[in-house]
Amino acid sequence: MGLNRDVNLAMMSIVANRLGALKEKVVFLGGCTTGLLISDPAAEDVRATIDVDLIVEVATYLDFHSIESAMRHQGFKPDVESGIHCRWRSEDITVDLMPTDEAILGFSNRWYSSAIIHAVEDTLPDGSQIRRVTAPYFIATKIEAFHGRGRGDFIASHDFEDIVTVIDGREELYDEIASSEQSLREFIAASFSAWSENSDLFMALAGQLPPDSESQKRYGLLERRFMALASMQ
């Protein structure tokens, strides 16, 4: 499906193998997992990512400290120079490890806990087994991230780009969200509905597709899928 997808998945495989037994306690999410969610072989390649995102369910700071100790034991080192509290390094790979409890690092995402509960097993190309977020929770976590850091800029936001990539490349997404919990459905529909009132939205949708005429032919399908999700009950 594309070089970026292959590179992202290879990076995930390296992280999965370096985590050792700790891999069982974390869930992969974020831009690095986008390639695992694309089911349409004709879809465009995913965005290249520079890090691997992990979430972990912890109840206390002591629990998170235990996870951090396990990360160090596996050879990961805090990336102090970045100034990002959740960031780790393992040789040339960057990993962001985020707890579900906002009180621990001062930030989180309202959908992390549910994303962990509903996480599914998946197999990477090298045979590594991981747990990852489902497509509906991928969309929800990305919407929440866009609300927090996107500043309403559809063009510049990587979160919005990833959302569009999955809508375009996963035909079954509507049915998956429709069968999800009500709060998730309502959150996604309300967010998309609000976005659709912004005239920049539709220009941004077209802008996420390559400029060649063949790729732009997918715009009509992309817009229909987006609006179907926006009007979901």
Image (cartoon, helix red, strand yellow):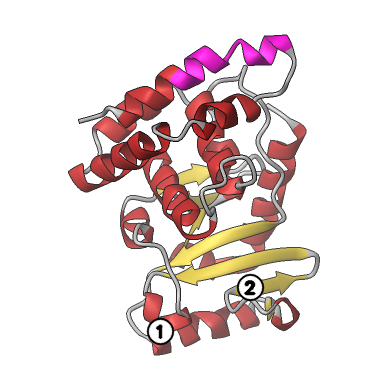
Q: Is residue 108 above or below residue 165?
A: below
Left or right of 14 on screen, residue 143: left
By secondary structure, the bulk of the magenta-drawn segment is best described as helix
Circle 2 residues within 10 Å: few <14, some 14–19, many ≥20: many
Instruction: State which quadrant residue 126 falls in.
Output: top right
Residue at 43%, 43% (x, y): give it: 139
Please, what is the three-letter code of the amino acid marked with disc 2? Answer: Arg
Question: Residue at 37% across / 75% down in the picture?
Answer: 101
Q: Would residue 178 be counted in the magenta stretch?
A: no
Quadrant in which the N terminus is drawn: top right
Indicate the position of residue 160 as horizontal and vertical percent values: 54, 42
- Magenta extent: 213-223
- Relative height, residue 222 to residue 27 (above, below): above
Picture coordinates of residue 228, whole percent (x, y): 34, 23
**In the rendered image, the vertical position of residue 89 relative to residue 29, given as above or below:** below
Q: Is 105 rendered above or below residue 182? A: below
Residue 84 in view here? yes
SS class, disc 2? strand
Residue closer to the observer: 28 or 226: 226
Residue extending furthest toward the right: 92
Q: Quadrant of the C terminus?
A: top left
Q: Give the percent coordinates (x, y) of residue 51.
A: 67, 58
Residue receiving disc 1:
63
Q: Gap in Å between the C-alphas at discs 2 and 1?
A: 17 Å
Where residue 44 sits: x, y (%)?
A: 66, 25
Question: Looking at the rendered structure, which numbered label has been put on residue 87?
Answer: 2
Which residue corresponds to the image point at 73% horizontal and 20% vertical from the top-left? 211
